[in-house]
């Protein structure tokens, strides 16, 4: 690990958690936004993660983001995207977490930490989003899904901006929500086991 202060390390880990959480709602928008802030010099990254800010990466992620946002507004396509993104969102979260951690760690360690931090962090918002979509589809016949999708787009953008500005606060929020959901899930599972 590089010679970094505790403050730099905590900030990098917090940013890794925050951007990975963004990936749980949208797989590609956070990749594009991260590339933009790296290009602007607001977030330092080490090789090989600097590829995120190359012209080709920004073009590909920009087009893919537009397709993802539009596709998520179309009934049935949104559920197909969610199925594909069950794999893509943790991958995106891992890459982004590793990228922001590369500024305080060697690339191999950053990649390992990115996987450990990014994948599970991205899965929590993904699970919430998927559950909300199922409830919306069942209760409204899918008519509310485009509205939910638009709110998710706005939420990802706002969460990403906050992640860059106040990463520790965003990470704390994500960790608290994750802990509460895990507690609720374990409580529900215990009740199910006892009832059986």
Image (cartoon, rainbow, N blue to C red):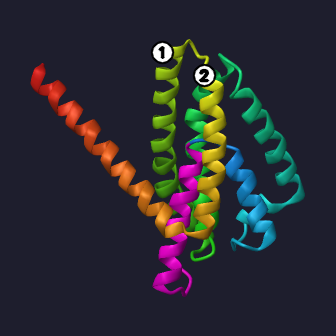
Please state the extent of the stretch shown in magenta in the rendering.
1-24
Q: Residues within 10 Å of mark 2 (few under 14, many from 20)?
A: some
Horizontal arrangement in the rendering, residue 8 relative to residue 41 (left or right) = left
69 sits to left or right of 181: right
In the displayed structure, 58 sits above or below 196; it is below
* Location of residue 111 with respect to 180 vertically, above or below: below
Which image quarter holds the C terminus? top left
- Label disc, if present, on residue 106 of the rendered structure: none
Single out the mark in the foreground, 1 or 2.
Answer: 1
- The answer to whether 149 appears left or right of 118 in the picture is right
The quarter holding residue 194 reads top left
Mark 1 element type: helix
In magenta stretch: residue 113: no
Q: Position of residue 136 (x, y in %)?
A: 51, 21
Distance between the alpha carbons at the discs numbered 1 and 2: 15 Å
Rendered position, 43 above or below 19? below
Residue 66: x %, y % from top left:
80, 38
Does the magenta segment cover residue 12?
Answer: yes
Tell me how many marks there are: 2
Tell me where residue 148 appears, x and y as whole percent. Answer: 59, 31
Residue at screen point 46% across, 21% down = 135
What secondary structure is the stretch in magenta mostly built from? helix
Instruction: Quickly name the residue at label 1.
Output: 139
Numbered circle sitting on residue 79: 2
Specify the farthest residue to the top: 141
Q: Residue at x 15, y 29 (%)?
A: 191
What's the residue at 75%, 67% (across, down)? 38
Q: Which one is in front, 178 or 162?
A: 162
């Amino acid at each position: 690990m590089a010679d970094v202060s505790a403050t730099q390390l905590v900030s990098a880990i917090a940013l890794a958690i925050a951007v990975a959480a963004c990936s749980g709602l949208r797989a590609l928008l956070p990749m594009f936004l991260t590339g933009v802030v790296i290009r602007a010099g607001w977030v330092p990254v080490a090789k090989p993660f600097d590829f995120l800010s190359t012209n080709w990466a920004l073009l590909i992620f920009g087009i893919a983001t537009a397709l993802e946002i539009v596709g998520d507004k179309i009934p049935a396509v949104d559920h197909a995207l969610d199925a594909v993104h069950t794999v893509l969102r943790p991958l995106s979260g891992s890459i982004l977490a590793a990228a922001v951690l590369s500024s305080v760690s060697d690339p191999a360690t950053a990649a390992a930490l990115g996987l450990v931090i990014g994948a599970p962090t991205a899965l929590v918002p993904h699970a919430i989003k998927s559950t909300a979509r199922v409830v919306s589809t069942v209760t409204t016949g899918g008519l509310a899904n485009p509205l939910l999708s638009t709110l998710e787009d706005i939420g990802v953008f706002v969460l990403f901006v906050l992640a860059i500005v106040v990463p520790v606060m965003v990470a704390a929020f994500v960790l608290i929500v994750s802990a509460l959901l895990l507690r609720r899930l374990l409580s529900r599972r215990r009740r199910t086991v006892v009832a059986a």
